[in-house]
Image (spheres, helix red, strand yellow):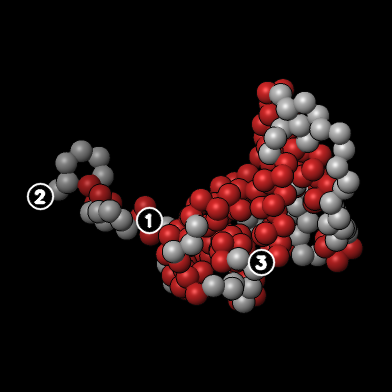
Amino acid sequence: MLNIEPEAKPVVEQTWKRLADFVFELGMLRKTPRTGYQFLGSGAENVAEHSFRTAMIGYMLARKSGADVARTVFLCLFHDVHEARIGDFNYVNRIYNTSNPVLAITHALEGTGLRQDALELWHELEAGVTLESRLAQDADQLDFIANLKEELDLGNPYASKWLDHAVLRLKTDPALELARAIQTTDQSDWWFVRPDESWWRKGNGKPRP
């Protein structure tokens, strides 16, 4: 994968117009599907949906770990921004395709005033040296793990094999703890059981005496 940062070009005037361009570009992530589910045979999501829950999981892990919460969340939010331009390559695609995410981020952020910060975050995440970057990488995987558990609960037997491999990618203890909890929790418990299971017996009107 080519990750060579392009040479600096003359700075484009930083205007609200360029920020507006970037807002519309972020909207493309809603239209960019995550492609691995075609191999699993069920499930679907777009990159924006994935990035949102990844950021929330990153927040949880950072709180548990005593890490820099804001930086972890920022790493999560920017981790797939380049896919608005290059799309999502699943693990099969990556055997045959290459991409240049650094070039994509650079072009996306030229003239916005955000380029330096965003590239710094992207390089930190890829290096995986800081605690925050490892947590963000784990948050990325945990979102996928949660999706696989949902598909497993809904009857896709192949999701179990994928889950076993996904858990092995986790790097931090808090992520492993959360993964264990996800694997042993029915995906419907949050609404079916809690906060009060008795509502199922109420039906229409008052419950029977």
Q: Secondary structure at mark 1?
A: helix
Q: Which residue sits at x=85%, y=61%?
A: 1
Query: Image height check: is 96 above or below 45?
Result: below
Q: In terms of depth relative to the viewer, which is nearer, 113 or 56?
A: 113
Locate residue 38: give its quadrant: bottom right
- Residue 109 percent across, percent down from the top left: 75, 38
Nearer the N terminus, badge 3 or badge 1? 3
Q: Secondary structure at mark 3?
A: loop
Circle 2 Cα neighbour tier, 10 Å, few/some/many (<14 / 14–19 / ≥20): few
Q: Which residue sits at x=38%, y=56%?
A: 190
Nearer the N terminus, badge 1 or badge 2? 1
Please tell me whether mark 3 or mark 1 is closer to you in this view.
3
Disc 2 marks which residue? 209
Disc 1 marks which residue? 190
- Residue 128 percent across, percent down from the top left: 66, 66
Please tell me whether mark 2 or mark 3 is closer to you in this view.
3
Disc 3 marks which residue? 128
Q: Tell me the amino acid under the disc marked 2.
A: Pro
What distance separates the C-alpha of mark 1 from that of mark 2? Answer: 27 Å
Q: Which residue sits at x=28%, y=53%?
A: 195
Q: Is residue 34 visible?
A: no
